[in-house]
Amino acid sequence: MSEGLSTLAQHCRHMEEIKKSRFLALAAPVDSTEQAQVFLREVSDPSATHNCWAWRIGQDYRFNDDGEPGGTAGRPILQAIEGQGIDRAVVVVTRWYGGIKLGAGGLVRAYGGTAAECLRRAERVPIVAMSRLAVHCDFAGLTLLKARLKELQAEVEREVFGTDGVELWLRLPESRVIEAQLRVSDLSRGRSEAKRLD
């Protein structure tokens, strides 16, 4: 995960009219290809002239010109996403043709510009690299251990009670892993350790 990337806090929209054509950009945070495809299906307007789109999730990306000349819509939308350091996001720019041709350069500016302005106005949240740890602890130390790990933004994903204690699976920011491992060792007086699951 690259440093400094962010994603959208929530759905956002921006509309522009360019030479009598209306361009509506709709953007959303997504965590998977499936989520991106669901968003595309939900917001694409079958009565519009074009529904062009792009999404990026880590190293995975796709874009589509939906009938506009090649390279004039989907790629400029993707470039708007990348140019603003955004990841895990999908943008659909829907166009209702107004009767005046824009030309290739005009289309690139219209699609890319509408997408960029939508993203520029959007509320963002930083993307935090996450890791997973497994910890085995005795019953007596469970409550204190969970409370102290919560202070490090650790979330319990799974909790399995056995005859000799509890197995916890935790998800926490990568930057807190070493601190969490030390805390587990300290609280258990060396009897437990936090092992990476990734």
Image (spheres, rainbow, N blue to C red):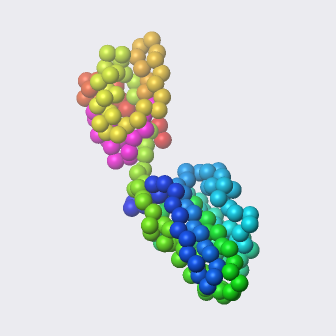
Residue depicted at 31% across the width and 29% down the height: 147
> Where residue 114 sits: x, y (%)?
54, 74
Residue 62, visible in the rendered structure: yes
Q: Is residue 179 shown in magenta?
A: yes
Residue depicted at 43% across the width and 27% down the height: 168
Horizontal side of residue 68 vs 170, given as left or right:
right
63 above or below 165? Answer: below
Residue depicted at 52% across the width and 57% down the height: 11
Horizontal side of residue 139 vs 74, given as left or right:
left
> Where residue 48 sits: x, y (%)?
71, 69
> Where residue 29 sits: x, y (%)?
52, 55
Q: Which of 42 and 75 is in front in this view?
A: 42
> Where residue 13 sits: x, y (%)?
53, 64
- Residue numbers of the magenta segment: 169-183
Q: Which of 46 and 108 is in front in this view?
A: 46
Residue depicted at 66% across the width and 52% down the height: 38
Q: Which quadrant of the figure has residue 74? A: bottom right
Magenta span: helix, strand or loop, mainly? helix
